Amino acid sequence: MEHPLDNPIYHALISGHQSISKGTAAVKYYVETIAAFAGLKENSAENLAVLYQISPADSVFVIFSKNQFQIPQQWQLLMHIDMYQLVYDSKEIPMINQKNWMDLSIKHVPEMKALVELTKPGPFLDRTIEFGNYTGIFQQDQLVAMAGHRFNPAPYREISAVCTHPNHLGQGYAFAILQEQIKRILLRNEIPFLHVKSDNDAAVKLYQKLGFVIRTEMIAYVIKKV
């Protein structure tokens, strides 16, 4: 039986995120204004052909895979990203290193999108905040760090959009926000996990310091309908 984290997007869309999914039994994708991710029961040319048929024109999707696979010609491969998938290896709720974080709401979305555009942790759309539990740190009324939740392949919940403004690195903001995110997930009796670019050594070390362990390598394919 496949582990849900071997195919986290698909398993999120058939479990924790059924209410915001579209597609067929084997080919799923998120409501377009929430996230540009698609999950296939099997990463095959046949399922990508179905995704092509059922999705809107000019759609761009991110698909995760543990193994390399060929993208059919009706799709344009915009990029592929090598990543690690890490899972929190403890049930201990962390002691919070308070850094005056606050919950973020829809009114903060323009600032959140600007910070994501600057730091490039991954896609963030107008309704991505609906994944929930976004927290941020402000300095002089400027959002300088944030993180929130994303995929929910039950019983796992992903921490995502972890980013800090370049002018505010080294202040412990990411560490503090991540502790809060871990705490919230554990209190839901869920297991935290996340993804990080495999060449981001500093982030990998931070996550390991917090108690995450590398579970597997993962590839993100960014594809567009042509």
Image (cartoon, rainbow, N blue to C red):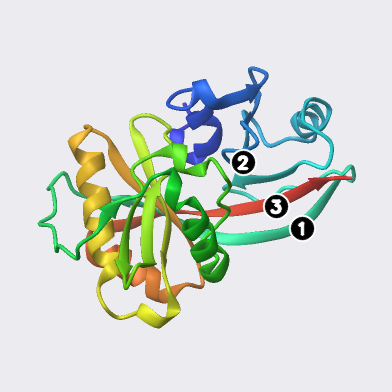
Q: Which residue is mark 3?
A: 222
| Residue at 19 percent of width and 46 percent of height | 183
Q: Which residue is mark 2?
A: 37
Observer-nearest residue: 1 or 83? Answer: 83
Q: Which amino acid type is shown beneath numbered disc 1? A: Leu
Q: Which residue is mark 1?
A: 78
Residue 144 visible to an observer of this rendering: yes
Q: Which amino acid type is shown beneath numbered disc 2? A: Phe
Label 3: which secondary element: strand
User: Which comes sooner in the sequence, label 3 or label 1?
Assistant: 1
**Whole-number angstrom distance, CA of label 3 to CA of label 2:** 9 Å
Spot occupied by residue 20 in the image (x, y as percentages of width and height): 54, 26
| Residue at 26 percent of width and 66 percent of height | 175
Q: Seen in the image, is 100 located left or right of residue 219?
A: left
| Residue at 78 percent of width and 25 percent of height | 54
Observer-nearest residue: 69 or 102? Answer: 102
Q: Seen in the image, is 57 located left or right of residue 68?
A: right
Q: Quadrant of the C terminus?
A: top right
Observer-nearest residue: 157 or 215? Answer: 157
Q: Which amino acid type is shown beneath numbered disc 3? A: Val
**Whole-number angstrom distance, CA of label 2 to CA of label 1:** 14 Å
- Relative to 211, say whether 63 is above or below: above
Label 2: which secondary element: loop
Spot occupied by residue 118 in the image (x, y as percentages of width and height): 54, 70
| Residue at 27 percent of width and 35 percent of height | 190
